[in-house]
Image (tube, coloured by chain):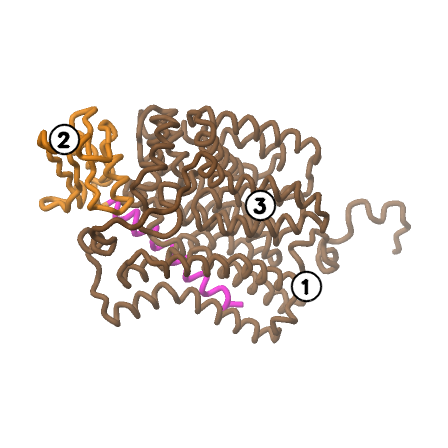
């Protein structure tokens, strides 16, 4: 019987270790207790893109989850699918400075008139 | 709105619509307390389906489904009558289940949230804030998944809709509150699984309590630490296993059937992987409860499968399911990951280590099970009937799921091997959870063999002769009879 119980007990101990590690990591980071990295990233994007502006997300970042996140981290803006309908281009790039907020940083470029007609 | 107030609103929104249905169908039992949030989450998911299908706001769809489920359960409860002996648990077993489940969701206190979780589940919740036409527009988005199969945007709606409803009711997008509410639904499913496992193990009772305490944390390990970041592998696997236990391995009664139906719909409405489990469980449970009568099978199975398939059917009816477009040129997913999330070098030692860490739980328990069978000197074909049922129904559900998962992976998102192996742990969450329940059942069978009660069947509510002898004569027995001595 102990042979059967042992793997379950080991798995439960490892599961408990996941919980403990998460709680301990959260306790260490004051920033994590205040807000998630996403709240922080959204605030940065909101500061760069005017409310209601039409924004395009470049298709060269083809991963769906990246695209979705890019759309939704700027909920006050309107994401369009073509540059000729947009005033701004929004990308997420690796943050070069402090990554306390997020390992990613928003990069917003105002499109020239010939790009957004 | 503060997180505490948002959490209160979320708890009411999730558990509220489930209260009347569980009281009508399960009665005032401990188990009803934990079934109510699961029923409420299913109501929200079906409400999201109505939103897409009928172009209604999420709140309207949720209210409509809530009223329909409440009225239907009251009518059904009156028809079935009260179930007096069903699903009673002693308080100590309930306490073990609650402590085990609570320990397994303590991570909910962390605000951390992975990229996938934010983009798949939480961001999608925001679509519902804008309106049903926006939901449809986004589901048709040309930004398709690089994975084969349905785009991620069309994943089942339960987690997203729960977050969306919370934010719509509170008027505030609060990720932390959404994470806490979803963790509450997961905890409720974990308690139900623990109680089901405790009942499955039967005698000796201490083993059932130990099982109830261990299973939630083991399930968390199988779903990996990504659960702490908000991934939804834990709830779908737990709900699927609980649906299997209540529907196929415990007594064939209306209360167990009710829980199996609700948990399987939750399983299918959380993730696509869960849909495979839920459909298999629904078909097998319908066959079991129909007693070989076609009319009964249809009356039970058709509405159940309709609820499970409603999201996919709704997407198809409004023309949102279309052939996947050809992969556009550009950098691959592997390139993206290499830039954003540097991985260890794919050296042979790295691959072996990752494989050994994550896959031992598929090989190790099987070996342990075989050792137990040798120790109790019972070849598989001579196992007691309950033990055969436990192994067989788990195999029927887990093997096709493993096969489907293998096919999906072999279709290939083009991930580097270390990444694939690291993800393998999450791909096998359900089979590993199923194996652990099988091992606990084997332990119980071995223990009963050792104490001379090998054939006790948890699916048979009739007490065995040994149990009757242990309890003594029933109340009233011997009244009016002459006593000797």
Residue B343, quarter of the rendered image = bottom left
**Label 3 Cα neighbours within 10 Å, binned few <14 / some 14-19 / many ≥20:** many
Percent of width and height locating residue B446? 59, 67
- Reading the image, the residue beneath label 1 is B455
In percent of width and height, residue A36 lies at: 25, 39
| Distance between mark 1 and mark 2 Cα atoms | 76 Å
Disc 2 crowd, CA 10 A, few/some/many (<14, 14-19, 20+): some
Please tell me the colour of chain B.
Answer: brown
Q: Secondary structure at mark 1?
A: loop
**Viewer-side residue, B65 vs A89:** A89
Question: What chain is tagged by disc 1?
Answer: B
Chain A color in figure: orange
Left or right: residue B22 versus residue B291 is: left
Q: Eyeballing the image, is B333 above or below B320?
A: below
Q: Is residue B152 magenta?
A: no
Q: Which mark is residue A116?
A: 2
Q: Disc 3 designates what residue?
A: B260
User: Where does the N terminus of chain B fall, quadrant-wise?
Assistant: top left
């Amino acid at each position: 019987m102990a042979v059967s119980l042992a793997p379950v007990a080991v798995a439960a101990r490892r599961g408990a270790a996941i919980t403990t590690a998460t709680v301990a990591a959260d306790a260490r980071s004051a920033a994590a207790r205040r807000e998630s990295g996403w709240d922080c990233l959204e605030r940065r994007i909101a500061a760069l893109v005017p409310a209601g502006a039409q924004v395009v997300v470049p298709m060269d970042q083809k991963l769906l989850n990246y695209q979705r996140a890019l759309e939704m981290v700027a909920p006050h803006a309107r994401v369009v699918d073509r540059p000729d309908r947009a005033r701004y281009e929004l990308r997420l790039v690796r943050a070069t400075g402090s990554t306390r907020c997020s390992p990613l940083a928003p990069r917003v470029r105002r499109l020239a008139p010939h790009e957004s007609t | 709105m503060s997180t505490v107030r948002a959490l209160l609103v979320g708890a009411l929104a999730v558990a509220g619509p489930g209260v009347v249905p569980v009281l009508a169908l399960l009665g005032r039992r401990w188990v009803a307390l934990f079934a109510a949030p699961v029923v409420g989450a299913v109501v929200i998911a079906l409400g999201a389906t109505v939103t897409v299908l009928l172009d209604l706001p999420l709140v309207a769809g949720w209210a409509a489904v809530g009223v329909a489920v409440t009225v239907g359960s009251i009518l059904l409860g009156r028809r079935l009558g009260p179930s007096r002996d069903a699903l009673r648990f002693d308080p100590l077993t309930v306490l073990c289940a609650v402590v085990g489940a609570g320990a397994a969701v303590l991570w909910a206190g962390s605000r951390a949230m992975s990229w996938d979780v934010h983009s798949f589940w939480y961001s999608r919740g925001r679509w519902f804030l804008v309106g049903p036409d926006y939901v449809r527009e986004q589901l048709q988005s040309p930004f398709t998944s690089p994975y084969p199969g349905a785009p991620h945007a069309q994943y089942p709606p339960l987690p997203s809709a729960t977050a969306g409803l919370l934010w719509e009711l509170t008027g505030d997008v609060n990720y932390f509150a959404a994470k806490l509410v979803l963790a509450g639904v997961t905890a409720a499913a974990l308690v139900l699984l623990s109680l089901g496992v405790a009942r499955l193990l039967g005698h000796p009772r201490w083993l059932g309590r130990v099982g109830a305490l261990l299973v939630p944390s083991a399930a968390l390990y199988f779903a990996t630490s990504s659960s702490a970041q908000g991934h939804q592998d834990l709830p779908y696997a737990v709900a699927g296993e609980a649906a299997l236990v209540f529907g196929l391995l415990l007594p064939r009664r209306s209360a167990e059937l009710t829980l199996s139906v609700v948990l399987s719909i939750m399983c299918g409405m959380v993730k696509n992987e869960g849909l495979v489990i839920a459909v298999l469980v629904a078909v097998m449970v319908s066959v079991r409860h129909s007693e070989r009568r076609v009319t009964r099978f249809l009356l039970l199975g058709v509405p159940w499968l309709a609820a499970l398939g409603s999201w996919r059917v709704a997407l198809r009816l409004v023309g949102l399911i279309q052939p996947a477009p050809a992969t556009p040129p550009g950098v691959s997913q592997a390139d993206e990951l290499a830039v954003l999330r540097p991985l260890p070098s794919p050296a042979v030692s790295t691959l072996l280590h990752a494989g050994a860490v994550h896959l031992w739980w598929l090989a190790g328990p099987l070996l342990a099970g075989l050792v137990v069978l040798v120790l109790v000197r019972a070849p598989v074909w001579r196992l007691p009937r309950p033990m055969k049922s436990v192994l067989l129904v788990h195999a029927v559900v887990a093997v096709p799921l493993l096969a489907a998962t293998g096919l999906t992976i072999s279709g290939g998102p083009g991930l580097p091997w270390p990444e694939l192996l690291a993800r393998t742990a999450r791909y096998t969450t359900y089979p590993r959870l199923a194996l652990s329940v099988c091992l606990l059942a084997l332990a119980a069978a071995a223990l009963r063999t050792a104490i001379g009660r090998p054939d006790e069947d948890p699916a048979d509510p009739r007490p065995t002769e040994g149990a009757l002898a242990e309890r003594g004569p029933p109340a009233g027995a011997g009244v009016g009879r002459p006593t000797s001595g």
